[in-house]
Amino acid sequence: MIRLGTTTREQERVEVLETVETTELLDLVVFNDDFNTFDHVIDILIRVCRHTVEQAEQCTWIIHHKGKCTVKHGTLAELKPMRDAICEAGIDARII
C-alpha cells in the first residue's frame, strides 16, 4: 500500500480594504434678475450647459416664475467652469 503524504493547507485570510470615493453632487442654480432677456438666458443655457432648446426654455420660465432654477447637477469640477461662463454673461449663478 502506498501512502500519500498529507499536507495541511492553510487558508490565508486576506482583508481587502475598499477605498470608497464619495463624490458630492452639487447644483448649479441660476437666479432671476430684471436685466437679462429670456432669449439671452436661453442662449447661454444652450451654449454653456448644453441644454436643448426645450430644456433651456423650461428653465428660463422656472427662473422667471420661481426666482431660481437648478440648471445642472454635477461635481464642483464640472460645474465651476459653467458657473463662471454664466456669470461672465451677466447672469447670476451659484453652485449650491
Image (tube, rainbow, N blue to C red):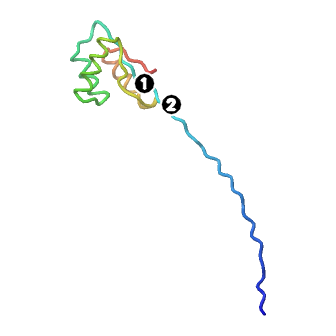
Q: Check disc 2 and report the residue beneath it.
A: 24
96, above or below 19, in the image: above
Q: Going by the picture, which residue comes out furthest to the front?
A: 1
User: Residue at left 54%, top 36%?
Assistant: 22
Q: Nearer the viewer, residue 90 or 62?
A: 62
Mark 1 touching mark 2, by CB under 8 A? Answer: no
Describe the element under mark 1 as helix, strand or loop: strand
Describe the element under mark 2 as helix, strand or loop: loop
User: Residue at left 42%, top 26%?
Assistant: 80
- The 10 Å Cα crowd at callout 2, few under 14, some 14 to 19, many 20 or more, is few
Q: Position of residue 50 (x, y in %)?
A: 29, 31
Q: Position of residue 48 (x, y in %)?
A: 31, 27
37, above or below 25, in the image: above
Q: Check disc 1 and report the residue beneath it.
A: 27
User: Residue at left 27%, top 27%?
Assistant: 47
Q: Nearer the viewer, residue 35 or 1?
A: 1
Q: CA distance from mark 1 to mark 2?
A: 10 Å
Q: Quadrant of the N terminus?
A: bottom right
